[in-house]
Image (cartoon, helix red, strand yellow):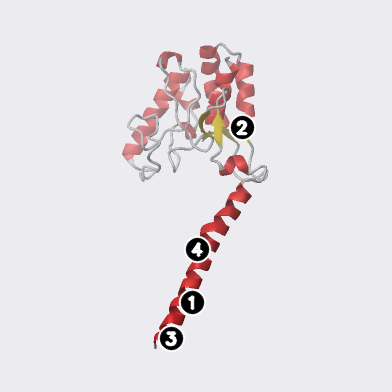
Amino acid sequence: MLTMLWRQTATGLRVLIAFTILCGIVYPLVVYGVGQIPGLAAKSAGSIVYAANGTPAGSSLIGVDPVAANPAADPYFHTRPSASSSDPLGPADTSTSGGSNLSGFNQKLLDLVNQRRELIAQREGVNPALVPADAVTASGSGLDPDISPAYAALQVPRIARVTGLSENTVRGLVAHATSGRILGFLGEPTVNVTTLNQELQEAQR
């Protein structure tokens, strides 16, 4: 009886030690090693965006809507609105990620979308009908760093006017921050606002 109990205990300990080494040491080291492969290292580290002085300035995977010190002279490109924000246009609460759970027929959501459209049209100095859909609707996460090329183009004249850069220069920055369709046919082209604002600040130095 004791001999059998000891054998079972010893077998269990050996299995525990083996799986501890395999899952607690070998597997993490393999994953870490794969993450250091050229082309994957930056993504595995969080896709960090760095300022000109080399300090981390954010992640290209997280969209944080910048707040202008003077709303009348707003020098930033803006992301999509967030359901976590108390303000119609943001900024988002980066500690919270998620949608509003309101349906497309919910009157509260429809009123909010119309309010956002009016605010953006006023900020950009355009007709509300020209404001694209992604500018007034929140993403599923509320922290989407990407906007449509149409929304980026809508903001170009304001950015050029406030920063003093030419519109062609600003459009060039937008083009550089634009990603095409996945595999050439999946999804739509997107503009990463995080990297775009970073390049915009560097262009003004």
Per the rendering, the mark at residue 11 is 1
Q: Quadrant of the N terminus?
A: bottom left
Please rate how many residues cluster around mark 2, counting C-alpha atoms within 10 Å: few if below 14, some from 14 to 19, many from 20: many
What element does badge 4 sit on?
Answer: helix
Per the rendering, the mark at residue 3 is 3
Residue, disc 2: 178
Distance of label 2 from label 4 (alpha carbons): 45 Å
**Residue 175 in the image, given as x and y percentages of width and height:** 63, 27
What element does badge 1 sit on?
Answer: helix
Please rate how many residues cluster around mark 1, counting C-alpha atoms within 10 Å: few if below 14, some from 14 to 19, many from 20: few
Q: Quadrant of residue 40?
A: top right
Closer to the chain start, of discs 3 and 4, is 3
156 with respect to 180 (left or right): left
Closer to the chain start, of discs 2 and 1, is 1
Q: Please say if 45 is above or below 68.
A: below
Q: Please say if 29 is above or below 114.
A: below
Mark 2 or mark 1, whichever is nearer to me: 1
Do the residues under discs 3 and 4 have CB atoms within 8 angstroms? no
Mark 3 or mark 4, whichever is nearer to me: 3
What element does badge 3 sit on?
Answer: helix
Question: In percent of the image, x 47 and y 21: which residue is there?
Answer: 127
Mark 2 or mark 3, whichever is nearer to me: 3
Residue, disc 4: 20
Closer to the chain start, of discs 2 and 4, is 4
Closer to the chain start, of discs 1 and 3, is 3
What element does badge 2 sit on?
Answer: strand
